[in-house]
Amino acid sequence: MSQYFKDVTTRVTLWNPATRVAQMFFRMTEALEPYAERPCGVVDLGYDEYAVDPEVFAAFVDKLAGRYLASNHPILKSMIAGYLPPAVVMVERSGRTLGALTAAIERSREAISLNDDAFDPDGDTRELRRSVEAAARAMPT
């Protein structure tokens, strides 16, 4: 059994994962809303389908990607790193891009790690791109 994440503007399927995977992704999306400080643009329609507002979702994922790249906190980054690849794939499948992946990134002053400095926006962008490419191959539509 699977569920659908569909673009509300085009009705194009952005992703058709297994039910448990879809439910986890949706719950993670909801949980990240306060961190992104913006709505996610994904609604559970309750019948094996999620409606994705592509503009709102792209802005949400862009904010998360920017915060991920700006952070020096290795634990915070590892938590966000698992969510971002499928989210970026869905943004790109909707025809949108993320400014955070091409912008100059400044070091964040939030959630600073004093023990281990993991600030590496160029390396993290390259690794995220590799993870996005791998995720895209594993994400049926």
Image: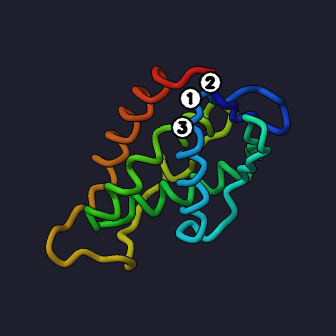
Badge 2 vs badge 1, beta-carbon distance below 8 Å? yes
Give residue 49's position: percent from left, percent from top.
Answer: 74, 36
Which element type, helix, strand or loop, lies under badge 3?
Answer: helix
* Label 2 – label 3 distance at C-alpha: 9 Å
Compare residues 2 and 31 and report the one nearer the observer: 2
Quadrant of image for the C terminus: top right
The kind of residue tagged 3 is Arg
Give residue 2's position: percent from left, percent from top.
Answer: 63, 26
- Which badge, 2 or 1, comes first in the chain's sequence? 2
Q: Residue at x 51, y 58 (%)?
A: 64
133 left or right, relative to 75: right
- Depth-wise, is mark 2 or mark 1 nearer the camera? 2
Give residue 113's position: percent from left, percent from top.
Answer: 24, 74
Q: Which residue is identified by label 3?
A: 20
Badge 3 vs badge 1, beta-carbon distance below 8 Å? yes
Label 3: few (<14), some (14–19) or many (≥20) C-alpha neighbours in 10 Å: few
Which element type, helix, strand or loop, lies under badge 2?
Answer: loop
Which corner quadrant of the image does residue 54 belong to?
A: top right
* Label 2 – label 1 distance at C-alpha: 6 Å
Give residue 121's position: percent from left, percent from top.
Answer: 33, 54
Question: Which numbered circle lies on residue 57?
Answer: none
The kind of residue tagged 1 is Ala
Q: Which residue is identified by label 2?
A: 1
Q: Residue at x 61, y 71 (%)?
A: 37
Instruction: Please tell me whether residue 39 is drawn above or below residue 124 in the rendered image.
Output: below
Q: Which residue is identified by label 1?
A: 18
Quadrant of image for the N terminus: top right
Compare residues 41 and 2 and report the one nearer the observer: 2
Which element type, helix, strand or loop, lies under badge 1?
Answer: loop
The kind of residue tagged 2 is Met
Count of numbered badges drawn on the protein: 3
Q: Residue at x 43, y 57 (%)?
A: 104
